Image: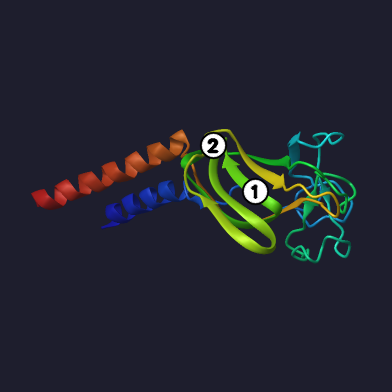
Amino acid sequence: MKRIIIAAVLSIAAISGAQAASIVGLNNTGLNSAGTAVGAGGAADGSYKLTAVTGNDGLSTGVPTITYDNQWPINPWLANSGTSKWITPTASQSQTLDAWSAGSYTYSLSFDLTGYNAASAAFTGRLAADNSVVIKLNNQTISNASGFTDWTSFSANSGFVSGVNTLDFVVSNWAQNGGNPTGLRVEFASSNVAAVPEPETYAMMLAGFALLGVVARRRKAA
């Protein structure tokens, strides 16, 4: 009996070494440079990068700006909260953009799964955009949405890779010659990924299973 208990403990200890963890780097929009708390309006978002801008002369790629809570277009946009805030491509959140043709703004978020089993990764979240957005994981479309007065859910449980992964939120701003800002808001609800067991973990698992086998054979022979 003692050997069975020892074997079980060894196996459980080995398996627990590969338990699921949250995915580090899946940050909501509007965080500070440390990625730990909602940032102040007018500050740079510390997690997202503006990696592509098309259809709007004069705007360049870089770091998006966190919006102020009580400045237009907050209301009619979903109000900022202590969980997330809207981010915009310009320091002036109310700036009119894309007067005569639609513009495209790609906000990118990267996270590293080195040391984890990419096939086990998954996440869920919700977002809003002015006006519409296509969500891509490692260049593969996983969802799309439109609207800035309500949330749309999105998720992924496949398409992850070992190492650095990239989520792209490609926002389209429909043409309008006045009062035409654009922005993105993202909140992650859950995420998980299993760690890849270390070599010593495999050894512990094998030792546990081997001991269980020995005990089982002896019990059968008796």
Instruction: Specify the quadrant of the image occupied by residue 52.
Output: top right
Instruction: Specify the quadrant of the image occupied by residue 201.
Output: top left
Q: Report, in whole angstroms, how far the alpha carbon at label 2 lies from the one at label 1.
A: 31 Å
What is the quadrant of the N terminus in the image?
Answer: bottom left
Q: In the rendering, at what x and y percent does residue 137 appear?
A: 57, 40
Relative to 125, is 47 on the left or the right? right
From this view, report whether residue 63 is shown above or below residue 83. above
Q: Nearer the viewer, residue 139 or 40?
A: 139
Question: Residue 133, which numbered label?
Answer: 1
Q: Mark 1 packing: few (<14 Cα in 10 Å), some, or many (20+)?
A: many
Residue 137 visible (yes or no): yes
- The amino acid type found where label 1 is placed reads Val
Question: Residue 75, which numbered label?
Answer: none
- The amino acid type found where label 2 is placed reads Gly
Q: In the rendering, at what x and y percent does residue 210 appear?
A: 27, 41
As helix, strand or loop, the secondary structure at mark 2 comes to: loop
N-term mark: 2 or 1: 2
Relative to 90, is 54 on the left or the right? left
